[in-house]
Amino acid sequence: MIDESKDGLVSYKRHPFVYLVEAADDICYNIIDFEDAHRLKILSFETVKDIFLEIIKANPKENLTKVEDNVLILKSDKNECLSYLRAKCINSLTYMCADVFMDNKDEILNGEYDNSLIEDIPEIKSVLQELSKINIESIYNYRKVVELEIAGFRIMSSLVEYFVTSALTPEADREKEQKKILELLPRQFSFEESDTPYLKVMRILDFISGMTDLFALKLYRKLRGIEI
């Protein structure tokens, strides 16, 4: 990693692998949210199908005729059809992002590349803008989605408060409940009492950020006494 620290502030250029992880996030969140929106009846089959096909068309390595033939075969089962197209979209975007990475590898390795990989695929720029617009207008602001998001805020903030407050309270001053909460930390996330507050908080955040949605919900309900 290229050090660009100055004036006493520690800073590094992004590691080359970061671009790949970000691309994976960009691809999966955009595409899977779209498919989920159809399953939840937020978006129509035709809307999702057309967007997916536009993305697949941009991949020169894809046999579009074969894809369209398979769509006709699978069309009677709309969920199955979109699952097929979703897989094809992810595959196409993965190859296109890999090409962008290799085309810009020197800039990336030298810390001079400031874009995301998916932004540098001109063939899909317009369709991704349309996809993003639909996501914001029709999916992320859909009432049930907003309700889940608000619940997520409460769950995450509560878990952080429980564990961080317990960890940062001096050992001699911890209440019994705080001691019990820290016993729930898996061994790989435990800390020494002599560790800095920063390291203790990072251990806690590593633990919480690795939770699945279901695990976080169940743990929150148990800590709040909602579920025994």
Image: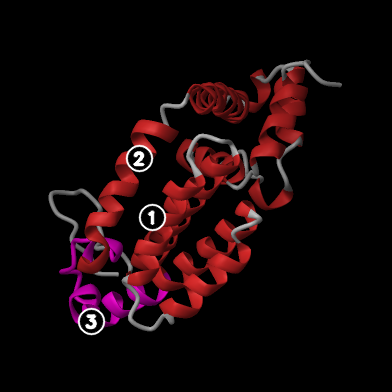
Residue 213: say if magenta: no
Relative to 90, say whether 8 is above or below: above
What residue appears at the point 60 percent right and 42 percent down from the top-left corner? 39
Q: Tag 2's secondary structure?
A: helix
Residue 97: say if magenta: yes
| Residue identifier under label 2 | 134
What residue appears at the point 49 percent right and 69 percent down from the top-left corner? 88
Q: Tag 3's secondary structure?
A: helix
| Residue identifier under label 1 | 51
Q: Position of residue 18 (x, y in %)?
A: 37, 64
- Image color mode: secondary structure
State if disc 2 and disc 1 touch (CB < 8 Å). yes
**Which is more N-terminal, label 1 or label 3?**
1
**Which is more N-terminal, label 2 or label 3?**
3
Q: Tag 1's secondary structure?
A: helix
State if disc 2 and disc 3 touch (CB < 8 Å). no
Point out which mark residue 151 bears: none
In front: label 1 or label 2: 1
Q: Position of residue 23 (x, y in %)?
A: 38, 62
Q: Position of residue 81 (x, y in %)?
A: 59, 60
Q: Taken as a whole, is the magenta stretch helix, strand or loop?
A: helix
What residue appears at the point 42 percent right and 77 percent down from the top-left corner? 64
Splitting the image into 4 quarters, where does residue 126 fall?
bottom left
What residue appears at the point 64 percent right and 39 percent down from the top-left corner? 213
Q: Which residues are magenta?
A: 94-121
User: Spatial distance from mark 3 to mark 2, Cα to Cα?
Assistant: 30 Å
Q: Is residue 18 visible?
A: no
| Residue identifier under label 3 | 103
- Crowd around label 1: few <14 · some 14–19 · many ≥20 (10 Å): some
